[in-house]
Image (cartoon, helix red, strand yellow):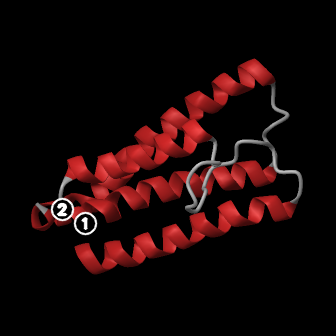
Amino acid sequence: MVWHYRKAVVFDLVRYAVLHGGCIALLVAAVIGIQGTMFLTAPVLGHLFLLFLFYQLIGLALLGVFGSLDVALSVIAVYTFMEVATQGTFMPWPHLFLFQAPADSLSLLPPMMWLGAGIVLSVWWIGREFW
């Protein structure tokens, strides 16, 4: 499957980025409709963009690791569900989401650092696996 997928990886990344970005835009528009634009600060927008890149790239990297779309999606879904359901308080793994507005730049540093590390490792793995 990886050999076949190697031919369409760039096209699929663009297609899924448009779909994923559209869904995020709808979610942000809904939150703006409910709460206004007060939450749209530069650090939160930067975090949202890094989270977008992370999910785009980690999905492809996990597909390369496991070689199965079902397993890759399951890993992503389980992590996301556990993180959101417990709001980052249950498991001792790196937390990627912001559940409260960052009080200062230090509270924003760990999620941004983990997102950056995940993006770099994903790009490295994708390059190793698909090219």
Which quarter shows the N terminus? bottom left
Q: Residue at x 22, y 63 (%)?
A: 66
* Residue 80 at least partly seen: yes
In the visual, does 27 lie left or right of 38?
A: left
Label 1 crowd (10 A; few <14 / some 14-19 / many >=20): many
Q: Is residue 40 above or below residue 65?
A: above
In the visual, does 10 lie left or right of 17?
A: left
Residue 106: image quadrant is bottom right
Q: Which amino acid does label 2 sit on?
A: Gly
18 vs 35, nearest the viewer: 35
Q: Which residue is drawn at 63% across and 42% down?
A: 87
Which mark is drawn over residue 67? 2
Q: In this view, does 107 lie above or below 127?
A: above
Which mark is drawn over residue 13? none
Label 2 crowd (10 A; few <14 / some 14-19 / many >=20): some
The residue that mark 1 highlights is 64
Residue 96 drawn at (x, y percent): 60, 55
In the visual, does 98 lie left or right of 22?
A: right
CB contact under 8 Å: marks 2 and 1:
yes
Residue 121 drawn at (x, y percent): 45, 75
- Helix, strand or loop for disc 2: loop
Residue 20 drawn at (x, y percent): 45, 41
- Helix, strand or loop for disc 1: helix
Q: Which amino acid does label 1 sit on?
A: Gly
Residue 75 drawn at (x, y percent): 35, 52
* Residue 131 at least partly seen: no
What is the residue that sits farthest to the top in this orientation?
34
83 vs 63, nearest the viewer: 83
